[in-house]
Amino acid sequence: MNSGESRVQSFLSNLPLFREMGSEEIERIARGTQQVSVSRGQMLFQKGDPCHGFHLVVYGQIKLAFTSPQGAEKVVEIVGPGQSFGEAIMFMEKPYIVFAQALADSLLLHVAKKTVFEELERDPLFAKKMIAGLARRLHGLIGDVEAYSLRSGAQRVIGYLLREEDGEPAKHSVDVTLPTSKGTIASRLNLTPEHFSRILHELSEARLIRVEGRTVHILDVEMLQKYGFGS
């Protein structure tokens, strides 16, 4: 085994999807896996490109988005370390319906479709974990539709900030570092950049948050929760 193969196996064994697999299973999957390095701003694939497998993020951040006929960009998902994308399209055997672009220098693993299908036939546990991952993504999409339909813009922003805080919910102050640009987050929340900025300004005026670049200081978590969603 060369150092590259050993490195891929090490990456795979530390990702949630493969964590419970034995060394033989990891070795089989590693043989059908390639490392993909992308620089910030680089396109990984375009809408309409064929899908030959799925990707896992080792480090970095990938934006999944599409462009409307009018030229506006809509961010569908922001994928970070330990997360995967492309499984559903791989199973449907259709071309990509979004484009993928690196928001930061990133290292990905691309697992070939043939390797995935062979392992699914061999290992029922792997199949179960793949299905669970797809179910979580579907649940997240349903949550997005609910938020866009039933929540105000301010509620969407507050919900996002509270979701981004690390660890157990605090009662008082906490700092949240926005993982990417405000424009990208606004698109993810189905808001215009102007509306997103206006909401941040309103929350600042209400002395619930303080914004410094990409850092949002939540001055009182409990009061912010009540402001957006009531007691």
Image (cartoon, grey):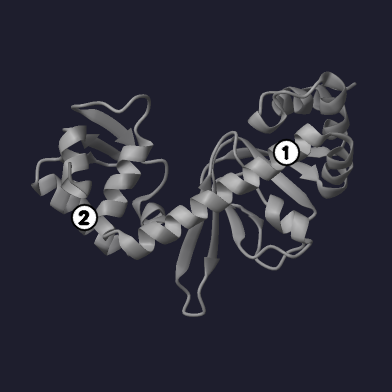
Is residue 109 visible to the viewer in this orientation of the structure? no
Q: Quadrant of residue 193?
A: bottom left
The three-letter amino acid code for the residue at tag 2 is Ile
* Helix, strand or loop under label 1: helix
Which residue is drawn at the image coordinates 27% and 42% (left, top)? 213
Relative to 9, is 208 above or below?
below
* Helix, strand or loop under label 2: helix
Is residue 188 visible to the viewer in this orientation of the structure? yes
Which residue is drawn at the image coordinates 52% and 50% (left, top)? 139
Rendered-image quadrant of the C terminus: top left
| Apparent side of residue 181 relative to residue 124 in the rendered image (left or right) | left
- Whole-percent x, y for residue 27 in the image: 86, 26
Closer to the camera in the image, 108 or 51:
51
- Whole-percent x, y for residue 144 in the image: 44, 56
Relative to 167, is 155 above or below?
below
**Label located before the other in sequence (1 or 2):** 1
Which residue is drawn at the image coordinates 31% and 53% (left, top)? 156
Name the front one of labels 1 and 2: 1
Rendered-image quadrant of the N terminus: top right
The three-letter amino acid code for the residue at tag 1 is Lys
Closer to the camera in the image, 47 or 144:
144
Q: Quadrant of residue 129?
A: top right
C-alpha span from label 1 to label 2: 41 Å
Task: Read off the residue under disc 1.
Answer: 128
What label sits on residue 187 in the rendered view?
Answer: none
| Apparent side of residue 214 relative to residue 27 in the rendered image (left or right) | left
Task: Read off the residue under disc 2.
Answer: 199
